[in-house]
């Protein structure tokens, strides 16, 4: 079969003040009609840059070499077009109409000053021969096709009035407005809860079958690749390192980087003492010509066993039971946080309970995992526990002392003992403050150490403890990667020598390999410093890896709480079962069956 999209020897370079950044280097790949091609790799591997080059959305000063051939199917024309040779006006006829794209962040891609309906109508008028009334009807039909509730009402809503999953459905509707032959989905589910992610993946499969589109699905999550892709391209630092049918990739990965990606994701069915990382499978050096030399690490059977050493359910359960025999470090009793709600100017004011009479205990040295979908009250609860927002009623006792009746002055000595690591590390750091200042500031506030020299030495020691060099002290937050910034935030949370830390979605935005490094670091720090964690996430696989017990929240209330393995293996509530069923998994039988169906369809 003739590829509908054929990328040949593509290289993309960005000129900077310090030189040239090689974002994509000599990459070739082909997308067949009706195929879903998964492109996987960490941030910076060139996945998104390659898709933006295909769409013609890179800056004018970008240096692009190679060819991108598009074969327009269904028109009777057999002459392919090299998209890189087209003028800007000619390129617009393909962008959005023939080749469309779903971006990662829907809220930043949608215009906040226009209704969702207006934005879909605008795309229809641009790419289809319709008048405005026809475009209005077609927009409603698209909203129905992407399974948005109350499509006519959605036409008048603004992006901020929709949930994350609904915003992504609007983006999909805009992408489908031109009846594209190729749909590029760039991390469309990364920021979504597992249940919403599952519905979006199912929706995309249905849309592909009904419309006969070819799909390029970009992600760093191998579980998502297993769910949706027919064939996979693995990219590393701008290079394509492996291409294989999805079943072959999961059963016989050839490149050490692929092996690392497959192993560093927490398995919901296995509890490892430590997550493997990409560095456990390969060594990367740069030769004299500036090229990467990748050497696979060969492990002996003993090393392989140690690398993937697991913990028995009995051992982990015994640990949790021992921890629960202590006096709790945190006791929460019937905690309520209500927000006032007024519907209409003259309507009677009511309240919305984000946290609704929640009670639980946390024991010294344990990790309590807190899971649930966005809006269930997880983050509101964590901020109430630390009094970053004031609860409406109830009680919170830390080390036996009630903290809700304390004044700010009385609370300050306790604040040194409990800290929080936020989801967005870049937003947590002052962009105008050096890393050294950020680390030493809590020590100054709480009068720790006797001199600036001692505080600086402690800050440098903390950086080394989170595997960062002391030279980071004089650098600014924007000079670090996302994973490095999160390590800095972890170091800052340790600056006050706390005993209790809330990790609020602290690894959700990280690549799977960086996520594995941070999770291993958190477990090591817990053991070394005797820390107690509340670990908040919507990803049950990650929570199960780090947690002794798991607490499931839904609509402000606790659905169930228990030992991590018991919650996963024998959930008592339907909501918990839905969360577990929505986790993307690499079931080899399902992958093989889908690949056989794809091969049969191609032949």
Image: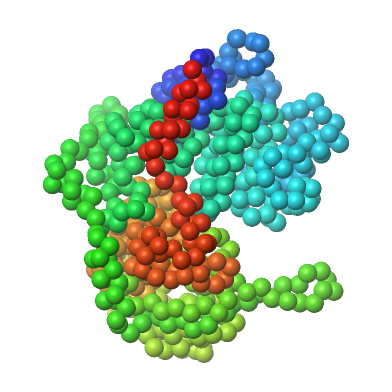
Residue located 53% across and 38% down the image: 186
Residue located 62% across and 35% down the image: 207
**How did the renderer colour the structure?**
rainbow
Residue located 34% across and 56% down the image: 518
Q: How many labels were placed on the picture? A: 0
Q: Position of residue 453 (x, y in %)?
A: 28, 71
In this orientation, does residue 495 appear? Answer: no
Q: Position of residue 429 (x, y in %)?
A: 46, 61
Q: Position of residue 288 (x, y in %)?
A: 24, 29
Residue located 42% across and 24% down the image: 27
Q: Nearer the viewer, residue 103 or 381?
A: 381
Q: Is residue 322 above or below residue 371?
A: below
Q: Is residue 554 above or below residue 330?
A: above
- On the rendered structure, is 81 left or right of 119? left
Quadrant position of residue 134? top right
Q: Is residue 396 above or below residue 165?
A: below
Q: Position of residue 108 (x, y in %)?
A: 62, 47
- On the rendered structure, is 117 left or right of 458? right
Q: Nearer the viewer, residue 22 or 196?
A: 196
Quadrant position of residue 163? bottom right
In this orientation, does residue 193 appear? Answer: yes
Q: Nearer the viewer, residue 312 or 275?
A: 312
């Amino acid at each position: 079969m003739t590829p509908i999209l054929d990328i040949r020897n593509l290289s993309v370079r960005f000129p900077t003040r310090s030189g040239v950044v090689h974002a994509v280097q000599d990459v070739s790949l082909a997308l067949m009609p009706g195929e879903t091609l998964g492109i996987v790799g960490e941030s910076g591997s060139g996945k998104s840059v390659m898709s933006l080059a295909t769409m013609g959305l890179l800056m004018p000063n970008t240096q692009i070499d190679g060819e991108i051939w598009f074969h327009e199917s269904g028109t009777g024309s057999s002459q392919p077009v090299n998209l890189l040779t087209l003028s800007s006006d000619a390129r617009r006829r393909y962008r959005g109409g023939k080749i469309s794209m779903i971006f990662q962040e829907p809220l930043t891609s949608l215009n906040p000053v226009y209704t969702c309906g207006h934005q879909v109508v605008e795309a229809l008028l641009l790419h289809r021969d319709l008048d405005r009334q026809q475009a209005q009807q077609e927009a409603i039909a698209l909203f129905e096709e992407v399974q948005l509730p109350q499509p006519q009402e959605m036409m008048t809503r603004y992006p901020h009035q929709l949930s994350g999953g609904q915003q992504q459905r609007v983006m999909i509707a805009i992408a489908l407005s031109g009846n594209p032959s190729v749909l590029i989905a760039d991390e469309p589910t990364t920021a979504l809860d597992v249940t919403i992610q599952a519905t979006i993946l199912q929706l995309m499969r249905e849309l592909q079958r009904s419309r006969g589109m070819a799909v390029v699905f970009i992600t760093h999550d191998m579980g998502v690749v297993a769910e949706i892709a027919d064939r996979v391209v693995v990219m590393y630092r701008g290079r394509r390192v492996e291409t294989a049918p999805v079943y072959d990739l999961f059963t016989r990965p050839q490149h050490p980087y692929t092996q690392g990606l497959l192993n560093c994701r927490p398995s919901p069915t296995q509890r490892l003492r430590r997550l493997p990382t990409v560095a456990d499978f390969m060594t990367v050096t740069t030769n004299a010509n500036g090229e990467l030399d990748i050497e696979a690490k060969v492990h002996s059977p003993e090393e392989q066993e140690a690398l993937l050493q697991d913990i028995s359910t009995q051992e982990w359960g015994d640990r949790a039971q021992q921890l629960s025999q202590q006096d709790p470090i945190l006791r929460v009793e019937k905690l309520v946080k209500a927000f006032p709600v007024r519907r209409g100017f003259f309507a009677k004011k009511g309240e919305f309970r984000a946290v609704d009479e929640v009670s639980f205990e946390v024991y010294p040295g344990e990790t309590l995992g807190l899971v649930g979908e966005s809006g269930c009250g997880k983050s509101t609860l964590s901020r109430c526990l630390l009094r970053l927002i004031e609860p409406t009623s109830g009680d919170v006792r830390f080390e036996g002392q009630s903290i809700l009746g304390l004044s700010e002055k009385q609370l300050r000595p306790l604040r040194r003992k409990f800290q929080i690591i936020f989801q967005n590390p870049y937003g947590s750091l002052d962009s105008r403050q050096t890393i050294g200042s950020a680390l030493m500031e809590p020590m100054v506030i709480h009068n720790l150490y006797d001199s600036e020299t001692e505080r600086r030495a402690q800050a440098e020691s903390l950086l080394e403890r989170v595997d960062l060099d002391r030279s980071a002290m004089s650098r600014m937050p924007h000079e670090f990667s996302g994973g490095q910034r999160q390590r800095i935030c972890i170091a800052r949370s340790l600056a006050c020598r706390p005993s209790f830390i809330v990790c609020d979605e602290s690894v959700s935005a990280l690549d799977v390999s960086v996520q594995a490094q941070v999770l291993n670091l958190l477990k090591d720090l817990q053991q070394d410093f005797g820390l107690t964690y509340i670990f908040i996430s919507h990803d049950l696989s990650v929570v199960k890896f780090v947690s002794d017990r798991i607490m499931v929240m839904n609509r402000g209330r606790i659905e169930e709480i228990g030992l991590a393995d018991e919650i996963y293996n024998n959930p008592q509530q339907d909501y918990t079962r839905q969360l577990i069923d929505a986790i993307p998994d690499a079931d080899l039988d399902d992958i093989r069956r889908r690949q056989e169906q794809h091969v049969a369809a191609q032949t």
